[in-house]
Amino acid sequence: MSADKPTTDLTTSSTSTSSVEHHGDHVPERFENPGLPPHVHRMGDTDPAAAKRSERQVVALFTLSIIGTIGFVVAYFAVPPGETVASMRLSNLLLGIGLFLAMFGIGVAAVHWAKTLMSDHERVEARHPQKSDPETRAGAIAALSEGAADSGIQRRSLLKGAVVSAVALAPLTIAVPLVGEVGGDWNVSKFRHTLWERGRRLTRDPSGTPIKPAEVTRGSVYHVIPDGLREADHWIEEKAKAVVLMVRIDPDQLTEADDRKDWSYEGIVAYSKICTHVGCPVALYEQQTHHLLCPCHQSTFDMADGAKVVFGPASRPLPQLPITVDDEGYLIAQDDFNEPIGPSYWERLK
Ligand code: FES
């Protein structure tokens, strides 16, 4: 077998057919080792103009990353999320494009650089035990040093400037939002209250039409928002806190704590839609079991038993919204939730 072809140690194989010695007879290898195909030089290896072209392409990709990072930072300050869905979408879109270009530019530039400009020597390495000896480790360090030298970063000053700039600026896409939040609104008391209050009607999301008990059919799940939500200040934030899921359950199947027996209405129960694990909207209702599943980490709540956790990482039941009907027969809240909605936070007392 020639020295430049990978070898296979057949004497240690567990199958008798691939063994070198089988009952004393010589068994030939099943497949001939094809070895490596002939080496094909890249254009840049033989043509300096092609190498220069590749270098320009790599610089352009790093520059794209720089533009993406700058665009991200500009968008972060110039296009805040605002109060409307459209402005939030625009802000997210611009931040997403900036982040994508920043990361994509660096990633593709690195790959293109490696494939077109770095050393193209082909080597065959024999397999060896995972634990390497000191000599091998020293060899690895030497190989890394050689790779660094092969990258040509010392000779190509333009490339060096581009890669240093792109890599140095890219962390801004994470740092700027973090720093921006330092001066933000950290008043957690706003999590204690939602728009729900005594007498506020339950309305359909997103139409805002009020709901009568007779319209709530068994087996269906209703996505509910407070009446007058759109007129509230920061209504998007208020909606994020106040969203509710409502279902009708056969009163015989309903388990209610003594102090909550009047929180439902004719089997209709309403619970916060915000998961108590880390705040995803729970929305998958299974009408046979009355289980409500959070799609993020599969916490499961029993709507027929106080929305208690029956599976998953959530540690508390979903807060219940006490409901009744008004004089016109529409479903209304009796009060706000009696505990903060959503996941735990340090200042939370219950
Ligand atoms: S956010 Fe609901 S299970 Fe994690």
Image (tube, rainbow, N blue to C red):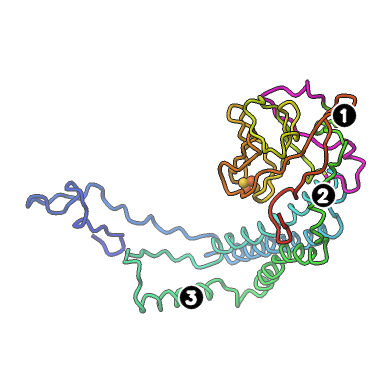
The response on whether ligand 1 sits within 8 Å of label 1 is: no
Earlier in the chain: of badge 3 and badge 2, it is 3
Q: Which residues are magenta?
A: 212-238
Front-most of residues 315 and 283: 315
Given contact means CB atoms under 8 Å apart, are the residues at marks 2 and 1 in contact?
no
The response on whether ligand 1 sits within 8 Å of label 3 is: no
Find disc 3 in the rendering and name its residue.
146
Which quadrant would residue 255 be assigned to in this image? top right
Please, is residue 48 above or below residue 343 in the view?
A: below
Q: Type of residue at label 2?
A: His
**Gap between marks 1 and 3, in whole Å?**
80 Å
Front-most of residues 293 and 45: 293
Q: Quadrant of the C terminus?
A: bottom right
Question: Where does residue 18 sit, x and y in percent of width and height?
Answer: 20, 49
Mark carried by residue 326: 1
Q: Specify few, some or many for label 3: CA neighbours under 10 Å numbering under 14, 14-19, or 20 or more.
A: few
Q: Specify few, some or many for label 1: CA neighbours under 10 Å numbering under 14, 14-19, or 20 or more.
A: some
* Residue found 82% across the figure and 60% down from its top: 187
In this picture, residue 12 sits left or right of residue 333? left
Earlier in the chain: of badge 2 and badge 1, it is 2
- Secondary element at tag 3: helix
Question: Where does residue 165 sit, x and y in percent of width and height?
Answer: 70, 70
Question: Where does residue 104 sit, x and y in percent of width and height?
Answer: 66, 56
* Residue found 26% across the figure and 62% down from its top: 2
**Gap between marks 3 and 2, in whole Å?**
62 Å
- In the rendered image, residue 235 lying in the magenta stretch gets the answer yes
* Residue found 62% across the figure and 39% down from its top: 301
Q: Type of residue at label 3?
A: Glu
Q: Specify few, some or many for label 2: CA neighbours under 10 Å numbering under 14, 14-19, or 20 or more.
A: some
Q: Nearer the viewer, mark 2 or mark 1?
A: 1
Find disc 2 in the rendering and name its residue.
193
